[in-house]
Amino acid sequence: MKKVGFIGAYDKTDLILYVAKILTVLGKKVLIVDSTITQKAKYIVPVLNPTMSYITEFEEMDVAVGFKDIEGIAAYLNKPMNQLEYDYALLDIDCAENAMSFDVQDCIENFFVTSFDMYAIRRGLEALNMFQVPIKMTKVLFAKEATKEDDDYLNYLSLGSKVIWKDERVYFPLEMGDQEAIINNQKISKVRFENLTNMYRDGLEYIASKLLGDEIPPSRIKKAIKEI
């Protein structure tokens, strides 16, 4: 099972659901783990009888809420760790404690997801500043436009942390059109891409391609996005 960290205080739930949907359409078995304080997945992913900790199926993926580590998920499923049948576990994390308990240093990729409002960026960096070991991360930035000044500002604020920024950056537009499409999807409990902007889709495609590597060609990923 390949672990992928999505770290930061910014709302990442829908982003992770959309990345997971691409992976499932491509035949991968995916687990989403919401370990955040807000546990947004509990409210937008349908579940009949939510408890403190549970796993539910949604859009051909599994969503786990309320777990502190992978061992807890394995115990819930009554399986040894090495027999978990997922290809990918996408981890939604907003604090250093959970980042460490899920061993994000062992993830195949780690993404720092943020906008540039002070709460999201400073609380997200607060988690990064508590990391005890160097961790490579890719920036996923939600902004109206991609500017060098914003990127330099993030680099400045993260000085002193153990994060090692990769050269690549993923930008998602803060567009009302995307937000409206996401809200409509939440209302009908579906994951659809048809009303998302091309830039938002491109960001999803890039993240999916990073996770899949050379296993699946880019043309097949594009086709999967069109199918969704």
Image (cartoon, rainbow, N blue to C red):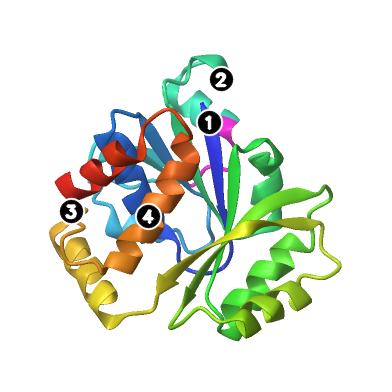
User: Which circle, 4 or 2, is nearer the viewer?
Assistant: 4
Residue numbers of the magenta segment: 66-70
Q: Please tell me in which quadrant of the rendered image residue 101 appears.
A: top right
Residue 163 visible in this rendered orientation of the protein: yes
Find residue 3 and report its horizontal and vertical position in percent: 55, 36
Q: Any mark on residue 81, and which?
A: 2
Mark 3–mark 4 CB contact (< 8 Å): no
User: Which circle, 1 or 4, is nearer the viewer?
Assistant: 4
Q: Is residue 41 found inside the magenta-colored segment of the image?
A: no
Q: Is residue 68 found inside the magenta-colored segment of the image?
A: yes
- Earlier in the chain: of badge 4 and badge 2, it is 2
Q: Which residue is mark 4?
A: 204
Is 154 rendered above or below residue 32? below
Question: Cα distance, mark 4 to mark 2?
Answer: 29 Å
Q: Any mark on residue 111, and which?
A: none
Q: Which residue is mark 1?
A: 2
Q: Which residue is mark 3?
A: 190
Residue drawn at x 82%, y 70% as measured from the top left: 159
Question: Cα distance, mark 3 to mark 4?
Answer: 17 Å
Question: Cα distance, mark 3 to mark 1?
Answer: 25 Å
Under circle 1, the secondary element is: strand
Under circle 3, the secondary element is: loop
